[in-house]
Amino acid sequence: MQATSSIRETLITGGKTVRDVSEDISRQVEGKPTRLWWMAFSISLVLFMFGLYCLVTLLWEGVGVWGLNKTVGWAWDITNFVWWVGIGHAGTLISAILLLFRQKWRMSINRAAEAMTIFAVICAATFPLVHMGRLWLGLYWVLPLPNTWGSLWANFNSPLLWDVFAITTYFIVSLVFWYIGLIPDFAVIRDRAVRMGNTTRATIYNALSFGWDGAAKTWMRYESVALILAGLSTPLVLSVHTIVSFDFATSIVPGWHTTIFPPYFVAGAIFSGFAMVLTLLIVTRKVFKLEDYITIYHIELMNIVIIITGSIVGIAYITEFFVAWYGQVPAEYYAFYNRATGPYWWAYWSMMTCNVISPQLFWWKKLRTNIVATFILSIIVNIGMWFERFVIIVTSIHRDYLPSSWSMFYPTMYDVGEYIFTFGLFFTAFFLFAKFFPVINMAEVKSIIKSSSEKKH
Amino acid sequence: MSNTNEKFLVGIFDDEDILLHGVEGIREKGVKIHEVYTPFPVHGLDEVLGYKRSRLPIAAFLFGMTGTILALTMQIWMLGFDWPMIIGGKNFVSLPPFIPVTFELTVLLSALGMVGTFFIVSDMKPYKTPRQFDLRSTDDKHVMAVDLASNQLSKEEISRILKENGASEVNEKNF
């Protein structure tokens, strides 16, 4: 049996019983959507439609509608791609790594975090897809398929192709992991619908629940599957952002050509992912009244992860600078000098303020247990992380080897529009998830009610 | 599932610790338990029920190995033999650049293969309607089903043993 130290804080407050968990979490699936939900959903849908217009224009006219030029050939598209992939790292980290470390606090947050991961990866994938211009031909460029030139295969030496495999695998495995977790909870809603006599809902959730019956033998296999999936996902989640960083690190562009990139990118990804989880969960717990399940203690623990990963990112920034100076390679030295003092100094210093200084505020317990402060800082962190990718990508290439090629990047409406498209897609998907799927893993939370719930007095 | 008219006694347990001790006591009395249905994974239940460890990790390993071999042979054959291309003057076949894709396909096949095997061995698929002894088993009750046909003891006796071992109610269920 398990023993829990008495000094551990309770993870579930309000003296909840097992029955209360089914009741509290299923309620939002069973009830009618609130006016607040309709408003939020409509706004996301409007953003999505505007973005869709920009996307269709891009596909119709070609990539020329973006603000790219000969020198800056990669800008907002890849910045947004890396930003979204980074955000997509928290979900699997929470459900896989924290499962291997037996961290029970993951149980209230893993469902929503994994959903966020899946939607973020979809958003990320739109950028490399549309940047190909004729994305219907993209299948031949990215997958090893026989094609019209005979058997001229995809280039497996290219980090961009590794990215295709990494992102695809990450998406599929995260989706499977998420769905496996959802099956027992769909069965809860199915059986409640049967008891309430709602046949439509019972039929839908019966299809989704794969005939789950909760037999001890199935649970045993299920736990085995969850453990192995966690074991597989842990190196997977680390590999994905490592490979994303290879897109830059394997090049010879000063500012990109650094061996520090893989760990630095992975830490940054976890940093931004946790920030996005906080942004979403602070709103979700309020709207769905889940304060007893996602407590201040959960928020504090996530903030501690933010301090740790934020500090790693800060050290990485300083190390890059130190090595650029210590290595005394003129091109490398100039790239970093230009980053901090050149025409993009404002982007660089925004990044430094948001990513290095702001997470350090969480050393104060008052701030990391304060909902409003956490909410604001979580958004600031993600603004900083967007600037990080923009700084790395654009400042490294806008000063080309020939001064006559030096250039600046100015985004057009379509650059902005595609970014808005992903926001619309992300929030539309998240609101649909929050309405129709149980946002907290009921089965897991029920299993810790006895050991980690606040007792009724 | 095809044979009709199966008679079951269904014991309801309110708490996982009572259930764990109950299962031990009931099995000691010589009652054969058909299956126990719980709303959440109860640790140690598989041991007291005498289930063997799942062999799904073996399936995961075998599928993973298939992915490794498939990815390596694909890359070496395509770039090394079928259509060798000079890329940056490097060797046609060199292992390091093939590792990322090999790793990803290993994970992908391992995960998909294991989950597919899990669905097949547990007979789980969309639109399958499970046989449920008590709908509360997905809410907050632990439900123990005892098949009367496979037990020598009388219905009354089994019912008494279930109650003595912590069942809060005992019902009959026929299929």
Image (spheres, coloured by chain):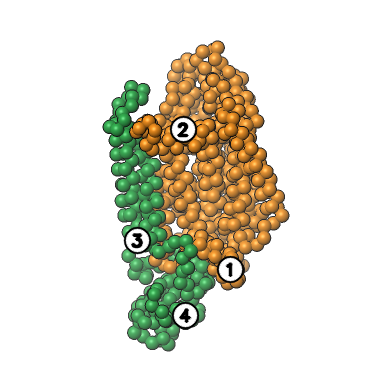
Chain colours: A orange, B green
Q: CA distance from mark 3 to mark 1?
A: 35 Å
Task: For marks 4 and 1, give the one nearer the viewer.
Answer: 1
Neighbour tally class for label 4: few under 14, some 14-19, many 20 plus, Cα within 10 Å: some
Please, what is the three-letter code of the amino acid marked with disc 4?
Lys
- The residue that appears at 49% across and 60% down in the rendered structure is A183
List the residue tagged with mark 2.
Answer: A245
Q: Name the quadrant of the N terminus of chain B.
A: bottom left
Q: CA distance from mark 2 to mark 1?
A: 50 Å
Q: Which mark is residue A199?
A: 1
List the residue tagged with mark 3.
Answer: B54
Q: CA distance from mark 4 to mark 2?
A: 59 Å
> Residue A166 falls in which quadrant of the image?
top left
Disc 4 element: strand
**Whether marks 2 and 1 lie on the same chain:** yes
Of residue A301 and residue B75, the one placed in the foreground of this image is B75
Task: For marks 4 and 3, give the one nearer the viewer.
Answer: 4
Neighbour tally class for label 1: few under 14, some 14-19, many 20 plus, Cα within 10 Å: few
The percent coordinates of residue A351 (x first, y second) are 59, 30
**Whether marks 4 and 1 lie on the same chain:** no
